[in-house]
Amino acid sequence: MTNSHGLGIGVHVMGLIFDVVNEKLQDLQVRPGLLRKHGYKIFEGRDFPYIIDFYGKLHEKKLTRINGEKVFLRDLEKISIYEAMSSEEEIDLADRLIVVMAGGALKSLHRNCSDILTSQDGPLQHSKWSKESIEKAKHCQPDNIKLSESVFSKVDHVFRKGINFSMGHAASLVVAKDGKLFRGAPAVWWKRHTKALLDMTRRYMKKFEDELHAQEEAQELAVQKKLKEQQELYARKTMKSQLEVVSYFGMPRIREVKAEATLLDIVNNEMKAKIDKMTFLKNFINTYVIGYGFDELYKPFSSVKDKSIGSYDDLLQRALSIVRMKLKPPTCPPVKLVSLTGPEQFGLVATEEYKRASRVSEDEGRAAVERVMSISERYGVKLQFPWNSLNRPYWHVELTELQMKLYRGAKFQDLDKGVWTTYVSAGLSYDTEAQDYFMYYYAESLKPVPKTTTDTKVHFSYFKDSHVLGIDSWKGSLRLL
């Protein structure tokens, strides 16, 4: 409020403002319904007269035309917020949420603003400001505050990068300057000052050097640790952004569709429900756009202005046009790295240290993708899925020790009714709803080997227990071969 809206409120009033916020949050914990009343205000004009004009301008503000008519902000608020709840159940839920949020806001307020709160007896509370201190604080205008924030953000960056700097150094200098500590200092540096400084330096030179080397070594270790953390974070971000790419790339059946006739046969004969047809067409399009990296084919699946976009006919024509292009799928998914915020974006020149760190981070990101692809190749299901339930593989959850031993083609024995039967793993797949991997498998004695997941002789089991015993619990009846 003081920084952004030019209300003429001084910094000394912040204590009073937050006292009001503190009081209102406590009220809302007892009477949450207050927040649902149209016209309820945190700050009243009688306590803050300079806010009356601000409220007036805010509520007279007109929005863009809706259905050809101009709408006032206050009317839109009333419709979209205060008249949105129609049942007692919705109102009760809203009240409970308000109580929870007010409690969280109070905790945050007491933790971060205790110095200016009267209830916390803060040293900067409103009643403790003298006329002299209020006068001195007049220079705390929005531009000065923003400049100070940018300076201290730079100081904070230096502080976090190494350990031989303390925020106390900057704070001490500010206090010293404001308190005119150096006002009585001599204006001239005499020879005796130089001699005393040199004598002290000679006497403690070895100690100074040892401390310097220790600090440099400690700072280097701190920088290395920070860079390692950044590399791991970057790899995780890259992997998260890459999950969708890998999942679409790993839908091998899409590659079978090379002719218009094949595509039309699938949607016209293989599927009955329209929703299944549309899901298949979206998967087909996304496989080329996301999984294969043909970004130029991207087009949204819906539009507020044009209802035909995303319809069945639209999706079918887009899929057919892709087939006609005869695009060749890549041998591996495109690696789309998370963009790094570099000095160049701020008109600065990147240092060699930054460039090296960027290269290392990018290498980590590519390596993470390669690891996932190797896992997909070793553990992915190669059985043929039906067109209306194509499998999109996800490998974002680390495999357990047992899961790693059950790679595709691995053999194991299961004890059933006193008889050991040998099975072959057909691969693992991840269920995003159950948040668990499951394994397809079939008896080793089967001839010929099953080709599809719909084959009745192909079984599947989750690893965690659900309504049936999971593989993790087959301890006495599972033998790995």
Image (cartoon, rainbow, N blue to C red):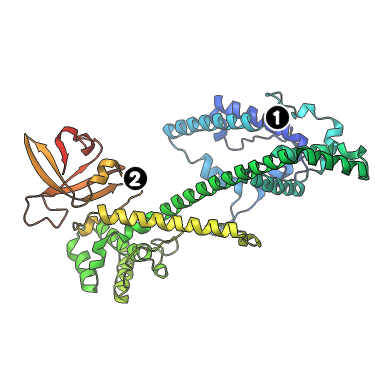
Q: Which residue is mark 1?
A: 115
Quadrant (top left, top right, bottom left, bottom right) of the C terminus: top left
**Between residues 189 and 471, which one lies in front from this camera angle?**
189
Res 307 seen here: yes
Can you say whether 43 is above or below 481 in the image?
A: above
Label 2 Cα crowd, 10 Å radius (few <14 / some 14-19 / many 20+): few
Badge 2 vs badge 1, beta-carbon distance below 8 Å: no
**In the visual, does 127 lie left or right of 367?**
right
Can you say whether 153 is above or below 285 in the image?
A: above
Tag nearer the camera, 2 or 1: 2
Based on the displayed image, in which of its 4 quarters is residue 42 positioned?
top right
Q: Which residue is mark 2?
A: 398
x, y percentage for residue 347?
66, 62
**Between residues 202 and 101, which one lies in front from this camera angle?**
202
**Between residues 179 and 104, which one lies in front from this camera angle?**
179
At x 74%, y 32%, the residue is 47
**Between residues 367 and 131, which one lies in front from this camera angle?**
367
**In the visual, does 133 lie left or right of 103?**
right
Res 340 seen here: no
x, y percentage for residue 317?
31, 71
**In the visual, does 314 lie left or right of 359?**
left
x, y percentage for residue 56?
70, 45
Can you say whether 296 is above or below 342 in the image?
A: below
Q: Secondary structure at mark 2?
A: loop
